[in-house]
Amino acid sequence: MPARGGGALGKGLLGIYLTALVLLPIAALLTKASSGGTSAFWREITSPEALAAIKLTLAASAIVVVLNAIFGTIIAWVLVRDEFPGKRIVNSLIDLPFALPTIVAGLVLLSLYGKGSPVGINVAFTRAAVGLALLFVTLPFVVRSVQPVLLELDQSMEEAAASLGARPATVLRRIVLPSLVPAIVSGVALSFARALGEFGSLVLITGNLPFKTEVGSVYIFGQIQNDSLPTAAAVSVALLFVALVVLGLLSFISQRQSRHVL
Amino acid sequence: MAIEVRNVDKRFGDFVALDDVTMTVGDGALTALLGPSGSGKSTLLRIIAGLETPDSGQVVIGGEDVTSSAARTRGVGFVFQHYAPFKHMSVHDNVAFGLSVRKRPKDEIAERVKELLGLVRLDGLAERYPSQLSGGQLQRMALARALAVQPQVLLLDEPFGALDAQVRAELREWLRRLHEEIHVTTVFVTHDQEEAMEVAEQIVVMNKGRIEQAGSPRHLYESPTNEFVMSFIGPVNRIGDAFLRPHDIQILPESDGTGTEALIERVVHLGFEVRVELKLHDGRDVWAQVTREEARQLELTEGQILSVRLPAPRVFSS
Amino acid sequence: MSSSAQGAVSITPGAGIRPAQRAPASGSGRDERAARARRLGVRSVALGYLALLLLAPVAMIFYRTFEHGLAPVWSAVTAPNAQHSFWLSLEVVAIAVPLNTVFGVGMALLLERGRFRGKGLLGVLIDLPFAISPVVVGLALVLVYGKTGWFGDWLATNGIQVIFSVPGMVLATAVVSLPFVARETIPVLRELGTDSEQAAETLGASAWQAFWRVTLPGIRWGVVYGVVLTTARALGEFGAVSIVSGRIEGQTQTLPLYVQDRFENFDSTGAYTAAVVLALLALATLLAMNLLTRHTRKRTAA
């Protein structure tokens, strides 16, 4: 067959680009993280400050994704099944956190919920600020993964259940939610991976206080500034590992799920 | 240009799509590749076009071995099952595509496109886009596009498959007339035996990656060499290993003792043709095909017992 | 799909959960009212959440920016460092986005049209930047291209500076926005199918001609959508660029870095103004995304 999808030259260039941008950097990161052996790696990621940062990252991400699962599903529901003026605009605004630079996201939250807040709420430099920033930047994930499923969901199923005498709450619990679970799980996993690595939106609003509001990525940033590259690399690898496990689980679950549906 | 396919094999993983296929299509002939789905007919057509490469064997077009040449140099016109229109181009640009990639002068292209659109009766639709055309119009546009580059052979993959019954019938008739007009060697793939019989001069019957039999429609109908061809082309009664054509069963006017006794279970009127379902005295079920006139003369009614004459059944050794 | 989607949206709200059969005439009104109350409740929760988390803060930043009138905003916009960081951001985007576009389309073709082993792995590799924290991306680049990195000595002897200068910032920006074009292009390419490319081939087009005249026009809206997302991400990138740029004022400071710099130097008008510029660009991105989805929908529906 003739050379479809580009010739050898094209493939070579693609390979070089991918190597320079992704492969080599990842390899260098792994090398640096393992340069002192397993015990050194373990020591780096269990130092009190590192451990506190990692724990905060995991805990904050976990809480945030639970809230995302709830509110994201409700928002998706309203965007699909409800009708109100301005719905289209609200629908497009959902993607704003994806489009808005993260540093701006942090500043935006700070302007309303920081010092001198017009509504009298000041979360600056607290753990609540971590949660707030993460909620902001991960908002679209669950909404955008649930929405299409809800659109495709056959409403006659719900009508059938209702005609058989099921109460609205029962229809929701037994018919609607089970169909949405895979999409919610997928949105949750993507949110979680994103939250683990979030940096820009946290810089201004959390104050980066060690043992209090310092998350993993901020800790890594600090270590890079101190030229402690092995420490930074070790914590990076630890966070990357968690993110990959979560995304790996997601693809495993979604594959099983799609087989189930088929 | 004649097409020769010699000992072609093609596998997709474990699936054997073509198994030692050899066939010849005469210059200027109109040939159907007929078979059930999965019989390898489309794969064979794509191999002739150069869209698939055979694992072994040769393809010869006009005496030249083209097995290893790219599709674009083979001089074949290919009409895809779903027409593969270039959706972002107007009808005119679709038809002009082959000429414009060959960098022909603009006025020559314009003239040729106009001529072709006339031939396929799409004049006046040149500035439309594919999304604005009906299925039958898309089909004709695809044909004009393939003919624009004056191909040596024209290949069509299930050309009428996606159309509704009436358009289908019209296009069949029209394809045959077009072929008479331009006389380019044409091969089309179909799973519909009626379509093959009606349009083609020669039919190649395929099954499970092999060619079962090739010949004129009449020849295949009258002298099938195996069970598959017998039962794929035309209606058939199967009695054990033996085969009977329904219209060969003769219903006798009186129970004169020379025939086999049979009970009429059902009489189905299908317009001109009447289908009579019979139970023979030994319990076997067969059906006979008679004309409306015959049915009236014989006064066939359900539950009636009469006698029929069965022709010598055909038995194929396997 | 899109047409059914449209249909589903326009269905009477709550119709799906209204128990039509069960209710006798007298109870019907009550059920209707209950359903409406439920719907209003759910709507208020959703919109309230969005208002508090999204709308109010974003509106607030516009208010804060302009609360002292236009004069301070104007001087913030025309400050030399602000101007410099704006143009530097554009420069980085203008290099990184075209590179990623070519790469993304090429990779999409390879993954969707090619047949080779390890395709799944390659797909994962391309998506990897989405799983990595921008800070980690910055670190990993420093480890390869920095002074003490793998290529540090070689780059130094050849007089090439990557880290703490524009090439490094382009690299960082390109990495974090790498997957978008390929991701958006692959499904469109799959939908386009291979028939029209093969048709072009049988009509005598070379692979190159088939790509430019048939494949690319067929996937262009997907590519453009990917480019929009890439641009938005590239323009706003903070963490990775923050590490590789060294944040040298007036030299390697992009607009997002400038926002942080101004804020930390208690120049809130400067910070807010730069942030508003970025926010307006983000809103423009949203608008573009919206128009593009509507455009593609119309095309597929036709």
Image (spheres, grey):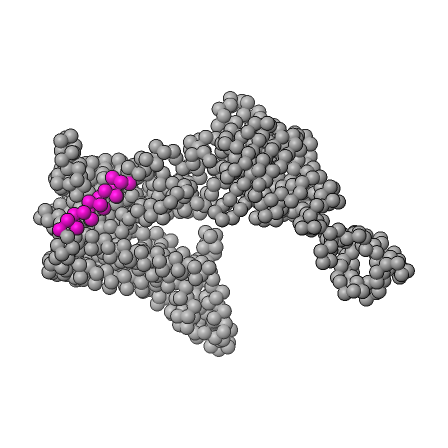
Note whether B33 is above or below C49 in the view shown: above
Residue B172: in magenta span: no
> In front: B7, or B280?
B7
Query: Can you tell which quarter of the image residue A209 is in?
Result: bottom left
The magenta stretch is: A18-36
Quarter of image, res B154: top right
| Residue occupying image coordinates x 23% and y 35% | C91
Asked whether, in this view, residue A74 is left or right of residue B254, the answer is left
Q: Is residue B57 above or below residue B234?
A: above
Position of B150 compared to B298: left or right? left
Residue shown at 50% from the left, 72% from the top: A163
Q: Residue furthest front?
A: B317
Q: Is residue B93 visible?
A: no
**Residue A21: in magenta span:** yes
Q: Is residue B241 above or below residue C282?
A: below
Instruction: Estimate the x, y position of residue B135 in percent, counting from the top left.
Output: 58, 43
Q: Return the residue nearer the eye: B23 or C44.
A: B23
Query: From where the camera sits, is residue B235 visible?
Result: yes
